[in-house]
C-alpha cells in the first residue's frame, strides 16, 4: 500500500490508507487514545481503541517515527475534518529522545539561542518551518521571474584570490599553500558573465567577515544576485528589481499560503512604481545632517515610515549614494560626479537591496582604482576583461534571509535561517 500524506485524507474517506510521520503528541484518555502524527504536509489524528494498539501508543515518545495503517472516517472536530480509526501502529525506528521543548505547542517557548542550539528539531515546529517554506517560494519566484525575461542562471566560484568589496573584511583560507578568500559576493563574476549572456543571475552563499552582532546581520547568507547589460543607467536596473520583487511576492502568496497563514502574515503590495528619493533628500526626510556620508538604521526606519505615510508603500528606493561609500566599480552620476548611479531599496525601513550601474570601460577601472590608491594587480583578471568590450551594465543583490525576516515580521534574521553562521555560531 502506497503511503499518502495527511492532506490527502479528506479525499480518502472510507478507504484504508498508510500514513507515516512523527509522533507529535499523544492524548491518553480513559476509553480511547489519540495519536497525532505529523508529516511534511500537516497533521493527522489517529483514534486508538484496541487495547493492544493502545499499549503500543503508550510506549511511544514524542518525535518517534511511526507508520500507521487504518481507515479514514469523517469527523468535523478532527484536523481537516477526518481521522484514522482501527489503526495498526508500527515504529520505524527506536523511541526518539524528546527535544528540550514542546513541539506541539502553538509557539516555541524556548529562547532563540536554545532553538538554534537544537536547530535540527526546533525547525520541525510549524512556525520555524513556515519561514523556510516562504524562503523557498521566494527563491522560486526570483528564478521564474528572471527566467521569463531571458536571464541565464550562473554558478560562480566561492573561493577567490582577492576580495570583492574593497575595504571589507574577508575570511582567509589556505588554498594549496596559496592565500585565498571566501567570496564576499559573485560581483566580479556576474559582471564578466554579462559579456557572455547579457543577462544573468545567481542564487548562492556569500561570506562577510564583518564583526556585526546585530539582529539583521549574518556572516554567511544567501544572496540573490542579478546583472544585466545594455542599460541606459541605474533606473533600468531598478525597473528589473521591481519586477523581480513583484514576482517573488506573488509566488510566496501562491505557493506558501499555508506558511503565511501559520505566521499570520499577508504579503505586501509591490507598487507599480516604487517611490524613489535622492540620497540628499533622504537625509532631509530622515532629519540627518547634510554631510552624513551614509544612512544609519535610524535613518532607514524614518524613511520607511515616511514612504508608508506619504506613498502607502512598504518599499522605497534611495538613489545617488555618495561615491565615497560605494565600491570602486560603481558608475558615478555624470551630472553630479560626487554621487553615484547606485541605489538601495528599503523594505519596511531596512536596507534590503544594494545595486546600481557599473563602470564598463577599462580606462575607467584603472582610474577608479588609482583614485582610491589601490593596485590593479589583485583585480587584474577582472579588470582585464573590460579591455575586450563590455556593454553598459548594472545589477543588484537581495539578501534572502533579510527579505524573509522583513516579510514575516521576525525580530531577528536568525529566526528565518535554518543554521545561521555569525560572530558566535558555527554549529550545528
Image (cartoon, grey):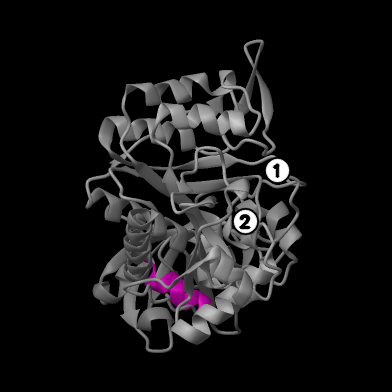
Secondary structure found at label 1: loop
Q: Which class describes the residues within 10 Å of circle 1: few (<14), some (14-19), or many (20+)?
A: few
Give 405 or 15, whichever is nearer the viewer: 405
Rendering coords of residue 339 (x, y %) = 54, 53
Q: Is residue 259 left or right of residue 2?
A: right
| Circle 2 residue | 121
Q: Which class describes the residues within 10 Å of circle 2: few (<14), some (14-19), or many (20+)?
A: some
Q: Is residue 73 left or right of residue 401?
A: left
Mark positioned earlier in the residue sequence (1 or 2): 2
Q: Nearer the viewer, mark 1 or mark 2?
A: 1
Residue 265 lies in the magenta-colored region = no
| Circle 1 residue | 427
Give 285 or 339, whichever is nearer the viewer: 339
Magenta part of the chain: 256-264
Using the rendered image of the protein, determine whether residue 174 is visible from the camera's viewpoint: yes
Residue at 47%, 20% (x, y): give it. 381
Give 324 or 306, whichever is nearer the viewer: 324
Residue 257 lies in the magenta-colored region = yes
Secondary structure found at label 2: helix
Rendering coords of residue 55 (x, y %) = 58, 67
* Furthest residue toward front: 335
Residue 141 vs 361, above or below: the answer is below
| Image mark count | 2
Amino acid at each position: 500500500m502506497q503511503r499518502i500524506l495527511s492532506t490527502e485524507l479528506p479525499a480518502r474517506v472510507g478507504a484504508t490508507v498508510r500514513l507515516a510521520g512523527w509522533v507529535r503528541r499523544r492524548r491518553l484518555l480513559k476509553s480511547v487514545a489519540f495519536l497525532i502524527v505529523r508529516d511534511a504536509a500537516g497533521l493527522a489524528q489517529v483514534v486508538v481503541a484496541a487495547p493492544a494498539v493502545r499499549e503500543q501508543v503508550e510506549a511511544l515518545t514524542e518525535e518517534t517515527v511511526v507508520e500507521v495503517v487504518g481507515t479514514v472516517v469523517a469527523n468535523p472536530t478532527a484536523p481537516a475534518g477526518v481521522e484514522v480509526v482501527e489503526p495498526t501502529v508500527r515504529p520505524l525506528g527506536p523511541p526518539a529522545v524528546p527535544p528540550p521543548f514542546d513541539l506541539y505547542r502553538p509557539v516555541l517557548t524556548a529562547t532563540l539561542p536554545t532553538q538554534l542550539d537544537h536547530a535540527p528539531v526546533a525547525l520541525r515546529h510549524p512556525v520555524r518551518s513556515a519561514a523556510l517554506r516562504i524562503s523557498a517560494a521566494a527563491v522560486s519566484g526570483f528564478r521564474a521571474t528572471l527566467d521569463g525575461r531571458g536571464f541565464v542562471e550562473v554558478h560562480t566560484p566561492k573561493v577567490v584570490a582577492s576580495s570583492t568589496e574593497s575595504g571589507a573584511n574577508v575570511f582567509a583560507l589556505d588554498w594549496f599553500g596559496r592565500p585565498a578568500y571566501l567570496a564576499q559576493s559573485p560581483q566580479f563574476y556576474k559582471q564578466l558573465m554579462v559579456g557572455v549572456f547579457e543577462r544573468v543571475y545567481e542564487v548562492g552563499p556569500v561570506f562577510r567577515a564583518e564583526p556585526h552582532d546585530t539582529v539583521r546581520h549574518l556572516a554567511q547568507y544567501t544572496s540573490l544576485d542579478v546583472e544585466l547589460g545594455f542599460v541606459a543607467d541605474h533606473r533600468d536596473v531598478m525597473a528589473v528589481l521591481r519586477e523581480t520583487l513583484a514576482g517573488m511576492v506573488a509566488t510566496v502568496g501562491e505557493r506558501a499560503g499555508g506558511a503565511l497563514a501559520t505566521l499570520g502574515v499577508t504579503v505586501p503590495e509591490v507598487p507599480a512604481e516604487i517611490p524613489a528619493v535622492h540620497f540628499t533628500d533622504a537625509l532631509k526626510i530622515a532629519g540627518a545632517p547634510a554631510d552624513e556620508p551614509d544612512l544609519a538604521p535610524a535613518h532607514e526606519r524614518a524613511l520607511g515610515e515616511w514612504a508608508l505615510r506619504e506613498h502607502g508603500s512598504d518599499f522605497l528606493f534611495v538613489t545617488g549614494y555618495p561615491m565615497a561609500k560605494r565600491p570602486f566599480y560603481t558608475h558615478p552620476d555624470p551630472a553630479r560626479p560626487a554621487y553615484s548611479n547606485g541605489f538601495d531599496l528599503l523594505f519596511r525601513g531596512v536596507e534590503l537591496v544594494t545595486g546600481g550601474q557599473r563602470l564598463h570601460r577599462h580606462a575607467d577601472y584603472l582610474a577608479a582604482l588609482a583614485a582610491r590608491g589601490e593596485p590593479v594587480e589583485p583585480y587584474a583578471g577582472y579588470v582585464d576583461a573590460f579591455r575586450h568590450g563590455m556593454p553598459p551594465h548594472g545589477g543588484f543583490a537581495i539578501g534572502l534571509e533579510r527579505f524573509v525576516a522583513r516579510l514575516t515580521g521576525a525580530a531577528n534574521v536568525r529566526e528565518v535561517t535554518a543554521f545561521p553562521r555569525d560572530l558566535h555560531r558555527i554549529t550545528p
